[in-house]
Image: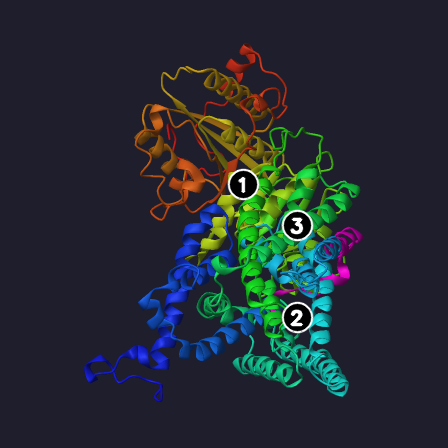
Amino acid sequence: MHQVRSRGLFFGDNPFHFPAPVLMAQLIVSASLSLLIHAILTPLGESAFISMMLAGFFLGPSVWGHNNEILRALYPLKSFYINETFAFLGCLLFMFVVGAKMDMSMLTRAGKKAEFIGFLSFLVPLTFNLTTASFLAKRNPNSGPVPPNLLYHMAAFQSVSSFHVITCLLADLNLLNSELGQLAVSSSMVSGTCSWVMVIFIFIARQDNFVSSTAMVWTYLSSLLLLLLIILVLRPIMYVMIRNTPEGKPIREGYILIIFIMVLVMALSGEVCGQHFLLGPVVLGLAVPDGPPLGTAIVQRLESFVTWILLPSYFVYSVAGVNVFSVDCSIVTSVATLGLTSFMGKVVAVIVPSMYFKIPLMDALSLGLVMSSQGITDVMMLQQARLLFILDDQTYSFMVAAIVVVTGVLTPLIKLLYQPSKRLKSSWKRGIQHTTQNMELRMLVCIYHPESTPSLISILEMSNPATKSPICCYVIHLMELAGRLSPILVYHRRGTISSQAQSSSHIVNAFRFYEEQNQGGNLSVNLFTAISPFNTVHEEVHRISLEKRASMLVLPFHRQWKIHGFEDDPKVRSVNRHILHKSPCSVGVYVDRGTLQRCLIQTATALLCSIGVIFIQGRDDREALAYAMRMGEKPSVGVTLVHVVETDYQPTTVNSCVDFELDYQLVCDFKIATVARRHHVYMEENVSDSVEMVNVIRRCENWFDLILVGRHHDRESVIYKGLAEWNSEFPELGFVGDILVASDSQCQASVLVVQQQRLDMSADYGGSYDRGSVTDDAMSTVTGASSTIANPWRPNKVPSGKL
């Protein structure tokens, strides 16, 4: 291979005799096979590490590479020098990126629980393993097939853990947001730090056998100087870069290039100092301030390319010489024994203190399995140990294979045992309909973009905070986790804004000002910022709504209307769908068209805010009506109930009979309210099919400032037949909501789509918005009194007669 590039097949060259085409082919094969295996194993709950390791085994001598001419041509011996260089580059950048996403402050913020579990999960398995290794060594006093020194080193390497591995595993399993995930990350920071210190001492002690003591002193000093350089010089430089970046603006490209050069310089410095080339990049990555703007920019530029293009080649290189079928049985027995001892030690070390801290047994077991997982850093340690002749080839081969087997079994088992979504359920009825008049209403408001703040404040104002029924509001600014691995929940204390969530300052200030305008204890606001992956942030929202006992959760719709059209955010839409799917309380999706803010401004000139409720049937419609009735207690608000009744409807099942009775009771309550409040209007519309129902909804589109509708209805009813085509654009809003919000709708009003808390049908018994009972005589009087169709506060928009 004197030339790097091939002239091509048509000029008589074989591309696989030249380094450049061979390298590109190797990257293509390793990346493609890793992605293919990952696509197959992801539904089974396996992590990306297992997929890449299996790809390496398939291409190695244990499976396809043993006697395969194609793979021999693709991976000739001469190419391994170049492949090894790219593999180490990918490994170097990967460890730097993972370090850049880590929040090292968690090490100082870890509570006693995490510190205790983390330290014991390092000490106990190490003690168990060294004791077992001593026992095995005594059984073979003449060194036997496995020398005692090798046994002790195997024992030490089997007991280590790494926060890189634990955090990546939790991210793959979507458990970073869970209570178990947060405890595991904090604990792994403690155990991982102890493990790294121990391994570094093992490597240094081994190197001491080959060089003079003077050389080792210089190695220690230069390594210490390297660490001090990163902490005292390079990290402050990064903070200068951040200070020179305007808020909300991306980091300069020049700064990113400087960081990349720092990574390569630190890797070179580690090699010059006699340490592993990963030492400098790993510490430099941990020194990078996580999150935006710097950490996020680094991760966005490197993560995908490094993880799925360069890193698979590292795993191919790592198992290139691994042939598990040639390993001596004595090695297998020793590794299996020490591996089992280490596993039991870690599980016991986690379960015992967890039970002391009153963690449920199954959660403690799941945490123990997480802390027992191994990954890429363990492979790197074994590789360095083989390079220093601490481990022989056979021991290395089987220990790597054991890592794949153990982690491959544990990962789906963890996913099976620990399912946080099943815990986020409430057995109590929580919703507007089940909140009595004199109770405090607890609301949870989610915000994705600061632009939504005025509209959501308007919803709060319309919810009628009053002395007899105050509102306790919890506001969460949901931000996507970028440039860091650990999710953060920041509570904004009064008068302060956390440095970790400066982008929430406008939201915090706006709600604080609104709270100050509502003196007298009618309204209290608690503000949070949740920085989390958007694929699991719904679990954080559900957990907070349970902890705070919220009755109503308000979400902004993913579509925002602008002056020149609208803008969709698919990530917000996905989060909303997940929240709606398993919410432990009632949910309202607010579609803002600006009418509610204008209406609140107009109330200062004695004009009314007009609210409409399109009521058909079902618990979601009842929740929407109950919410509107609460809003209607505000003197400046008028509520119109448009009751759509199916002609000749007769309930046929027990559930439909229950729904019919509860609908009737709540509608009667509203009719009673129309007698006391002249601004409330009841209208009844009989429909016989879906066309007539759609016509009624269309004619209501521009009557009101705000329209409340239920999300779910009885799909078996005749009036819903043929409506599937109407529910094609926004199915998460239900039939009626989709009709009002769809692109072809002429509706200019804001819309609130309400879903009641999902419980058993029995949960609807015995709880309604308590307005008193209604007799048949009273009903006939009320019906006659409110039979007018005209909308009294919008006379120019509502014709006389039927809708």
Return the residue nearer the eye: 151 or 237.
151
Measured in 3D between alpha carbons, the distance from the residue under mark 2 to the one under mark 1, in whole angstroms, is 41 Å
Return the residue nearer the eye: 112 or 587.
112
Return the residue nearer the eye: 88 or 344.
344
Image quadrant in which you'd find residue 225: bottom right
Return the residue nearer the eye: 349 or 660.
349
Relative to 274, is 709 above or below? above
The residue indicated by pointer 2 is 286
Q: Position of residue 484 (x, y in %)?
A: 60, 63
**Mark linked to residue 588:** 1
Q: Position of residue 75 (x, y in %)?
A: 38, 72
Q: Dot 3: what SS? A: helix
Part of the protein shown in magenta = 100-127
Q: Position of residue 109 (x, y in %)?
A: 76, 59
Which quadrant is the C terminus positioned in?
Answer: top left
Q: How would you rate the neighbour count of disc 2 (Cα within 10 Å): few for under 14, some for 14-19, many for 20 or more?
A: many
Q: Dot 2: what SS? A: helix
Image quadrant in which you'd find residue 169: bottom right
Identity of the residue drawn at 69% across and 73% down = 203
Measured in 3D between alpha carbons, the distance from the residue under mark 1 to the one under mark 3, in whole angstroms, is 47 Å
Horizontal relation, residue 151 to residue 639: left or right: right
Dot 2 amino acid type: Leu
Identity of the residue drawn at 60% across and 80% down = 267
Are the residues tagged 2 and 1 within 8 Å (C-beta)? no
Tell which circle, 1 or 3, labels the residue nearer the N-terminal end.
3
Q: Position of residue 285 (x, y in %)?
A: 63, 72
